[in-house]
């Protein structure tokens, strides 16, 4: 190979490499871009609001096991938080009722805890007039 063909080969390789990298970056930016409105929609779909600690609960589960958990609820706004503080006893009673009717299998797995979370939101909203958006398990110990 002479010197001229070697230079042409090196320039062709560098040009191909540059076009490949540039094409990839351009495709990622313009063709495969994610819409910013979709990102904001995903973030805004989760309602946020004040957190209201309900308390620590220790209950006997069905089958002889026990559960000790601390629960906080997320409410829709500050007005709901104030009204729910007044109904604290009713909320605690509802939580105790739901938890004491569960077995160890109903709290052990992440999927079971998610079902428990949904049930607690539904049951608490019967007392709270749909002001609760989420239930948070701050701690959970079972045996």
Image (cartoon, helix red, strand yellow):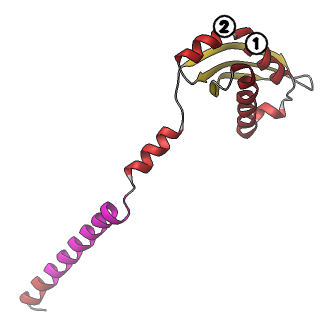
Q: Secondary structure at mark 1?
A: helix
- Per the rendered image, the range of residues in magenta is 9-33
The residue identified by callout 1 is 90
Give the residue at x 32% y 67%.
27
**Mark 1 neighbour class, 10 Å CA radius: few under 14, some 14 to 19, many 20 or more:** some
Asked if the stretch drawn in magenta spans residue 31, the answer is yes
Among all residues in the image, which is located at the extreme bottom?
Answer: 1
Give the residue at x 67% y 19%.
71
Which image quarter is the C terminus in? top right
* 38 to the left or right of 128: left
- Does 38 appear above or below 12? above
Tell me which secondary structure the magenta stretch mostly adopts.
helix
**Mark 2 neighbour class, 10 Å CA radius: few under 14, some 14 to 19, many 20 or more:** few
**Picture quadrant where residue 63 is located:** top right
Question: At which x and y percent is residue 82?
Answer: 58, 11
Which image quarter is the N terminus in? bottom left
Give the residue at x 62% y 14%.
53
Pointers 2 and 1 in contact (C-beta within 8 Å)? no
The residue identified by callout 2 is 86
CA gap, disc 2 and disc 1:
9 Å
- Does 19 appear above or below 38? below
Total residue callouts: 2
**Picture quadrant where residue 75 is located:** top right
């Amino acid at each position: 190979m002479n010197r001229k063909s070697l230079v042409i080969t090196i320039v062709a390789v560098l040009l191909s490499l540059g076009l490949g990298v540039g094409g990839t970056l351009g495709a990622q930016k313009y063709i495969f871009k994610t819409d910013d409105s979709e990102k904001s929609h995903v973030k805004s779909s989760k309602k946020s609001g004040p957190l209201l600690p309900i308390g620590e609960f220790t209950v006997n589960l069905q089958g002889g096991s026990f559960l000790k958990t601390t629960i906080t609820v997320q409410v829709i706004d500050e007005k709901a938080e104030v009204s729910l503080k007044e109904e604290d006893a009713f909320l605690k009673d509802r939580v105790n009722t739901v938890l004491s009717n569960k077995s160890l299998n109903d709290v052990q797995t992440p999927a079971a805890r998610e079902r428990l979370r949904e049930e607690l939101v539904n049951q608490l909203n019967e007392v709270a007039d749909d002001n609760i958006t989420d239930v948070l398990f701050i701690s959970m110990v079972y045996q």
